[in-house]
Amino acid sequence: MAVAFILLISLIPRTSIGQDGTSGAAKAVAPDAKTSGEHGAAKSAVSSDHAKSATKHVSEADLVLPDLDNSTFIFGLIKGKMLLYGGLIVCFGGLYFGLMIYQELKAMPVHPSMREVSELIYETCKTYLISQGKFIAMLWAFIAVVIVMYFGWLLQKSTEQVSIIVLFSVIGILGSYGVAWFGIRVNTFANSRTAFASLKGLPYLVYAIPLKAGMSIGMMLISVELLLMLCILLFLPCEYAGSCFIGFAVGESLGAAALRIAGGIFTKIADIGSDLMKIVFDIKEDDARNPGVVADCTGDNAGDSVGPSADGFETYGVTGVALITFILLAVNEKTAGKSFEMVQVQLLVWLFVMRVMMIIASAGSYFLNEKLTFAKYANAPKMDFEMPLTRLVWITSIISIALTYLVSWLVIPVLGGNSELWWQLSTIISCGTLAGAVIPELVKVFTSTSSAHVREVVDSSREGGASLNILSGLVAGNFSCLWLGLSITGLMAVAY
């Protein structure tokens, strides 16, 4: 989406600016500097003022949001704030969706021994998260001092503004941390329920339960993030929005970095420790007598659940903050004319309406795909697990692309006097959406159990030993990078 806004600035009509920064109209009426001493002095003074303004430091904390009611949308019927209030309703719907699936997973039947194991793993995960929370608190104390020194002492911001940045850094950390904790709870529920459901011998349940858990975490993650950002836009004073966003971005980045990196390290150490116990005591890795088994399972949850959940929350948030910053800085009087604030409002509202639309598209695609999968595999003895997942990705992508064009046409049919930007921006976003569908297909070529590359690696390992295994893996890896790179480059070229 950042590419979309870069293209946008190049397309919005603007005044003609000379190489020296003077507009064409000003050059036409200005007297010759060589024959006018007064003009020469004035020009020197203006240049001095420009030099001072050019060196003035401006950060995200200095951004001021325009009045969101400065423009109307959807045939002039709805103001910007009212449209975003509808986004709040969708966010609460996403939260309800996530909690509903959470309760559904919790109520599923499970064998007492399986529940005991999953609860033991969860308790160990809680210990890990509490330790991580203490570590993040120490990191935050250090970062808070840096924030106060930088914004308060170096940039001479007001005490109130610095306090807002520090406060919202805490909110960002709590967001990443809370989503990660919710994810670990849902996953440990789903693990034992999936294991118990597999005893029925029907593959559909083994597919459906983990997917429900993933949808629950994903909807909760996106809805919480979007809800917080919409609250900043709608309920806080415009002059404080920049400080709120920069603090929020710093906080969620700090929390995600600690949880992601530490989770990855923890899972590797636990995995290796379990392997060492297996060798030392000559027992199987998943044997109940191996004390490393629970640590290994906890490590898997820490690396594959806690880290990605916090990382996804952070990525979704900081990209939004970056786009808001880009809109407010790039769309100004020079690039968009005197009505630049109206263009800013149109882009800000459009940006968040698109994000809200993605929640609706994701939920609708999930329910549609589940209906199709249930009708075909509900009582089937065998199932291709890749097929419904692939279909879900493509259904979501197609619906999202269609809604992207429709919503853009409704929200920004004319932007900065240009009636073609709505479909140009939609096309750029659609290229990104298409990448989300094409890349998994290319990855499957090199990772699927039915892939020729995977069979080649297996045959090489069986017939040639370790050396041929490494060589065949390198060949497959290089090919995968080639095609993934070409696909991304091609989509970026189309967007450009």
Image (cartoon, rainbow, N blue to C red):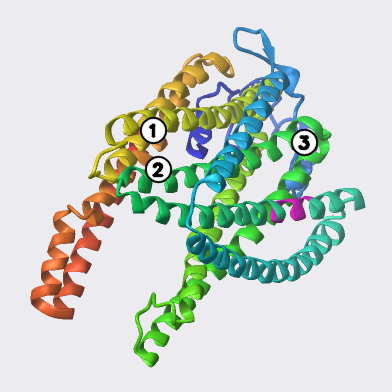
CB contact under 8 Å: marks 3 and 1: no
The amino acid marked with disc number 3 is Val
**As shown in the figure, which amino acid type bears the numbered disc 2?**
Ala
In the picture of the structure, the residue carrying the numbered disc 2 is 208
- Per the image, the residue denoted by label 1 is 370
Q: Position of residue 172 (x, y in %)?
A: 70, 52
Q: Regarding mark 3 in the picture, which secondary structure is present there?
A: loop
In the rendering, at what x and y percent does residue 124 appear? 59, 70
Q: CA distance from mark 3 to mark 1?
A: 44 Å
Residue occupying the point 26% across, 50% down: 444
Determine the secondary structure under disc 2: helix
Label 1 sits on what residue type?
Glu
Q: Residues within 10 Å of mark 1 (few under 14, many from 20)?
A: some
- Percent position (x, y) of residue 315? 56, 49
Residue contact at pointers 1 and 2, CB within 8 angstroms:
yes
Q: Residues within 10 Å of mark 2 (few under 14, many from 20)?
A: some
Q: Quadrant of residue 351?
A: top right
Q: Report the front residue among 41 and 412.
A: 412
Q: Is residue 83 above or below residue 328?
A: above
The residues tagged by marks 2 and 3 sit, at their Cα atoms, a distance apart of 46 Å
Find disc 3 in the rendering and name its residue: 64
Mark 3: give few (<14), some (14-19) or many (20+) Cα within 10 Å.
some
Q: Which residues are magenta?
A: 168-173
